Image (cartoon, rainbow, N blue to C red):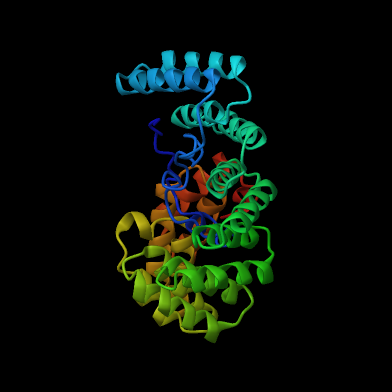
Amino acid sequence: MLLIAAVVSAAIYLLRDPAAPLDFGSFSEAVRPAQGTEPPPNAGAKSADARKVDAILDSVDGMLQSGKSAEAEAIVKGAVEQYPSDQRLHIAFAELMLGKNDLAAAYESYLRALASGDRDAKLEFQAGTVASMLGKSDRALEHYAAAQTADATNAEYPLYLGQIQLQLGKLDEARASLVRAGHINPDDGRVWGSLAEIALRENKLDVALQQIEKARAIQPRLTLWRFVEARIHARAGRPEKSVELLIGLDAAERASEPVARVLADALSALRRDAEAADVLAQASDKSPDNANLAFDAALRARKVAADERFSRLRERAAKLGHVGAAELN
């Protein structure tokens, strides 16, 4: 009915923060029009108000197709005030807010939708996904758990629930949720990659390696799983394996901070310090506002006597306010 603008997480959480939950790219597939925007078949004759809302939504759909999003928003906003008990209008307004990337307003509208009609699984899942994007992890957990309870056949619900539990450090609960997801859909590499991450955090390296091998067999081109496997090998004292996995990534992926740090440490463990210094310098150049990265890259440059690079990186760290930069010489 309504067109949802893509709400895309441009970066993979784990590549920003290895302690964060695994995120798989875009939420635009997760946040889509919920069931319940149309009454179910055989629901009987519609009321006069329901027919009026039908006409409003048809009009709004036409406006959106004509690019008149501001007019559509105004009409839906007025209709919500006039017919506050019609769940479809709250969902429609939430979708319009997603199109504007106004996640807070979208989440509030999803809450009103849940309060004004059936709390079906898909609607709970949508609310949970937007709550997660807002950083409301506790609320996202509640919504995903409700979605799973309402529909135990959809593997996405325990998968996303497991991700939030992982984010909150609830490793046992996360593992249980992910195992449920795996029973429903064993061909989803995200399940096994996430279980590998849990095992790695628990330092169960053999288990972690078994799980990440499953993930990579299903999704062999996904950089995220290469990164997880590289961390497993680094933890197990196999830096040559970590280098083998990461050195061939394209320049942009290799220069992301977490990848660069793991790769640099593995190179240093193999006494390839000059290459390690190059890797961190390139990562700092890609993220010139990162004070800690600039400082650590400067330390690496000093270690290999790359004086010009050292001076440049030290100056960058100092300008960004790193407390230790002034003491470097």
Tell me: 32 left or right of 325: left
Residue at position x 35%, y 18% from top? Answer: 63
Residue 105, image x, y percentages: 58, 28
Q: Quadrant of the N terminus?
A: top left
Q: Residue furthest bottom?
A: 206
Q: Quadrant of the C terminus?
A: bottom right
66 vs 82, nearest the viewer: 82
Residue 123, image quadrant: top right
The answer, for residue 290, to whether it is visible in the render is yes
Residue at position x 55%, y 46% from top? Answer: 129
Tell me: 226 left or right of 295: left
Residue 219, image x, y percentages: 35, 69
Above or below: residue 80 compared with residue 3 = above
265 vs 310, nearest the viewer: 265
Residue at position x 51%, y 74% from top? Answer: 183
Residue at position x 61%, y 42% from top? Answer: 131
59 vs 204, nearest the viewer: 59
Residue 252, image x, y percentages: 34, 54
Residue 133, image quadrant: top right
The answer, for residue 271, to whether it is visible in the render is no
58 vs 174, nearest the viewer: 58
Above or below: residue 265 compared with residue 131 = below
Tell me: 88 left or right of 58: right
User: How many numbered marks are there?
Assistant: 0
